[in-house]
Image (cartoon, grey):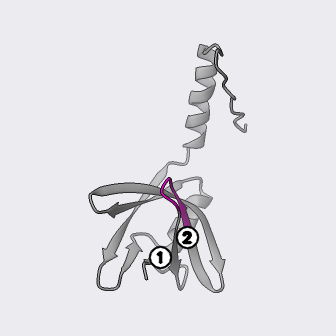
Amino acid sequence: MAYTKTTWTNGDLITASKLNKMEQGIADGASGGVMVITETYDPEAETSTLSATWQEIKDSMSSGVVPFVQYVEGDYVGLKQVETVNILDEQYILLLTGMEGGMQYEADTATDYPVLHYT
């Protein structure tokens, strides 16, 4: 059953029933699990390569798993969710979203490890 969110307003009464509905929605949404993919930065090439292939990421999404990419910027470690997996102009594309903006990784084939180019 699809989750119907509650639009809360000031003064609404929080009940056990409403909290249980929210908890069930979270549990249902995460039922496929989470996949954390790491990236490796190559300063000479100015690229970052992911630890899973494009096809592995696509397959995980198809089975209900939510993939995230763990990245490092200086002292900061963050996560961005893989939002879309596409083939565009013969490139295998992964689009990531996050609070700091999006990233696009590309691979030449479905079995390649996607790469982010900084230049």
Q: Up-down: is 31 above or below 104? A: above
Where in the figure is residue 3, as x and y percent of width and height? 69, 36
Farthest left residue?
Answer: 75
Amino acid, disc 1: Pro
Q: Up-down: is 101 above or below 108? A: above
Point out the tag, 2 or 1, that comes first from the N-terminus: 2
Where in the figure is residue 52, as x and y percent of width and height? 44, 69
Q: Which quadrant holds residue 48?
A: bottom left
Identify the residue shown where x is 34% and y is 85%.
45
| Most foreground residue, 43 or 90 | 43
Q: Position of 12 compared to 50: left or right? A: right
How far, Cα to Cα, is label 2 from label 1?
8 Å
Q: Residue 69 in magenta?
A: no
Q: Residues within 10 Å of mark 1 (few under 14, many from 20)?
A: many
Task: Give the residue pinned by disc 1.
Answer: 114
Over which residues does the magenta segment extend? 95-101
* Mark 2 and mark 1 residues within 8 Å of each other at the beta carbon: yes
Q: Position of 6 compared to 80: left or right? A: right
Q: Up-down: is 77 above or below 12? A: below
Return the mark for residue 91.
Answer: none
Return the mark for residue 94.
Answer: 2
Question: In which quadrant is the C terminus drawn?
Answer: bottom left
Identify the residue shown where x is 55% and y is 36%.
27
Where in the figure is residue 100, as x and y percent of width and height? 48, 57
Provide the secondary structure element on which disc 1 rests: loop
